Amino acid sequence: MIFLIVYDRRAGRIVTLREFEDAARPLAEEARLEADLEYRQDLATHEVILLEAASQTALRETHRRYFEDLEQIATRGGKGPRDRDPGATSP
């Protein structure tokens, strides 16, 4: 899967999250270019990125900063979902 993320650094949140099948890479790249153009005046405060992962769950593990705030990350320390207590529930 390919994921297009537009992230607002000031707000600390995702503005846009779109998923594309691997075969749709040209569409994902076109969407990224369109987002770059849309946010070109705000690129100092917004990130526009394409990431690849097997699933959104995997993406959330490898790129936690886009999905969790600093308090959530600090509470869990360096531990990802796989490192948590087996009896723990997901946030």
Image (spheres, grey):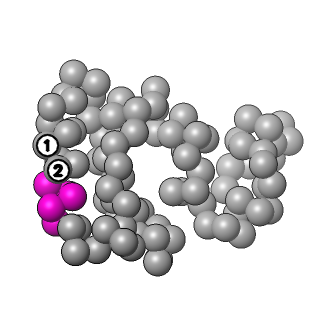
Assign the N terminus to one quadrant of the image.
top left
The residue at 46%/70% (across/down) is: 9
Contact? badges 2 and 1 (CB < 8 Å): yes
Identify the residue shown where x is 36% and y is 72%. Answer: 44
- Does residue 64 appear left or right of residue 85 in this picture? left
Indicate whether 48 appears above or below 43.
Answer: above
Residue 46: image x %, image y %? 36, 67
**Extreme-top residue of the structure:** 23
Q: How many labels does the image show?
A: 2
The foreground one among 3 and 10 is 10
Q: Please provide percent x and percent y for residue 62.
A: 58, 40
Q: Nearer the viewer, residue 17 or 31?
A: 31
Residue 6 - label: none
What SS does tag 2 mark?
Answer: helix
Compared across the picture, whether 30 is left or right of 82 comes to: left
Q: Which residue carries the number 1 mark?
A: 30
Q: Specify start and end residues of the magenta stretch as a single range.
A: 34-38
Q: Residues within 10 Å of mark 2 (few under 14, many from 20)?
A: some
Q: Is residue 85 visible?
A: yes
Q: In this view, does 3 lie to the left or right of 76?
A: left
80 versus 38 height, above or below: above
* Residue 70 location, quadrant: bottom right
In the rendered image, residue 69, in percent from the top left (x then y), is placed at 61, 66
- The residue at 31%/68% (across/down) is 43
Question: Would you name the residue on which mark 2 appears?
Answer: 33
**Secondary element type, mark 1:** helix
Q: How far apart are the alpha carbons under marks 2 and 1?
A: 5 Å
Q: Which amino acid does label 1 sit on?
A: Glu
82 drawn magenta:
no
